[in-house]
Amino acid sequence: MSALFWFRRDLRIYGNEALIEAVESGARDALFILCKQQWQQHNAAPAQIDLLKRRVSWLGHKLAELGVCLHVLDAGNFTKVPPMLAQFCQTNGVEQVYANREYEVNEQARDRACQEAGIQLQLFDGDVIAPPGSVTTGSNEMYKVFTPFKKAWLKQYEQQHFYLPGWPELAFTPREWEAPEALMGDGSSDKWPVDDDTLVKVVQVFIREKMTDYKESRDFPGIKGTSGLSPYLALGIVSVKQLLAEIQLHFPDLLQVTSAPAFSWVNELIWREFYRHLICAYPKLCKGFNFNEKYNDVRWRQDEMQFKAWCEGKTGYPIVDAAMRQLNQTGWMHNRLRMIVASFLTKHLLIDWRQGEHYFMSKLIDGDLASNNGGWQWAASTGCDAQPYFRIFNPISQSEKFDPQGDFIRKFVPELSDVPAKSIHFPHDYLQAFAIDGYVEPIVEHKAARARALGAFKV
């Protein structure tokens, strides 16, 4: 083999331009390298690793049908990847390795080490529309506010029609392939399909039938108003370019008509790009540093009991508890709820956002460093274009607004299943009046916690 494609978090065949170019350059072999210890160091959720393994196994079989053999190696961690890959290339006569670029600090260091080991690594920006560093201010600096970034991003791409290249029309001989034992999972992601036929339908149904209503329905966790595609974006099973190409089939002018309701979901994709550009421009974000250094002196509280109560969904605030239990039980959490629980941890409990960030990564099937870090620093008011420190979510009013009948709460906090809607958002007086036990008392009082947070951030 003279060329090889290296799968990372770009686990797709459809529209994978780097893979297609590799095949057109003669590649009939592809590679995936397991790095279990590295993933554990990065707090990767077991459900996400299970989803990854299932997808790689599906890829192996599908590629074999297309005449491409997928090799699976086990390196353990990133430091072992360069010598292992170099040995594989030498043994198999590989002269060129094609791959899609990853933007995190450790991944960038791994790729530099591969190049230093003599591997001819050709990298593509397959995870984004705009390569990091390509959307900048007039002084060639990274934007520090999202809205100007979005306007500049749209100016570059509003006239572009996105399409995906097809599979090369070359002569391929189907192969036999058997998934190695290393790809055996634990079944924790079984509710998430990994085959392309199903995923294409999911994408099309959302864009055709739900995307126009997304702006109005996205904040209500009791209904299916979101796309459910975040786990697939996190692993590169679907790409942003694929989504935009599909969107333009139904909404051809959407990038020019940003006032259209359907644009609200595209706006979320641009936020995703923004956070990726940030971790490239500011590598410290991958290392647990505040983006806004003026908040370095905030004195976070060390309270393991309250942190444990937050993790387990036992804070005494039903919407917070339901959200955390959803995360623990399913590996996923509705985006509005992510903002509520992050605000509660960092403002009501005044616990360091890094603890929440780490916990989320350890549970989320859609865990993604750039977006997770960006979201947590936004909620904690320490990030780029973050929520002002004095804007603190009231979990009771958030619950009343976005789960008015308490349907979502009852689903994940069954001890409140008989509490009427008017009392369910903060049910303690109702429970006391009827001598009902089984639900925890609130671990903080809202007004006092808010005042404490304001004092800490003013310093």
Image (tube, rainbow, N blue to C red):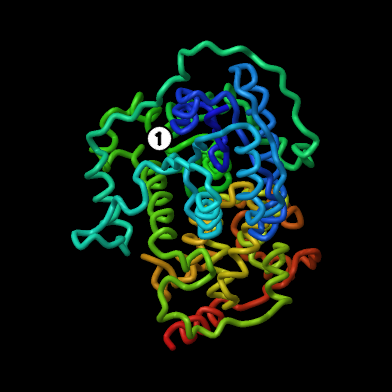
Q: Where is residue 359 in the image (x, y as percent from the top left)?
A: 65, 62
Q: Position of residue 431 (x, y in %)?
A: 73, 66
**Residue drawn at point x = 40 percent, y = 27 percent:** 246
Residue 128, compared with residue 306, is above or below; it is above
Quadrant for the N terminus, please: top right
Query: In which quadrant of the rendered view does residue 133 lie?
Result: bottom left
Query: In which quadrant of the rendered view does residue 66 lie?
Result: top right
Q: Name the residue under label 1.
A: 241
**Residue drawn at point x = 47 percent, y = 60 percent:** 374
> What is the residue that sits farthest to the left in this orientation?
138
Residue 336 in view of the camera: no
In depth, the one of 79 and 232 nearer the eye is: 79
Q: Position of residue 197 (x, y in %)?
A: 58, 21
Disc 1: CA contacts within 10 A as few (<14), some (14-19) or many (>=20) = some
Residue 3, compared with residue 127, is above or below; it is above
Task: Give the left or right position of residue 251, taking residue 318 as reference.
Answer: left
Task: Give the left or right position of residue 82, taking residue 413 as reference.
Answer: left
**Residue drawn at point x = 74 percent, y = 69 percent:** 440
**What's the residue type where badge 1 is placed?**
Lys
Residue 339 in view of the camera: yes
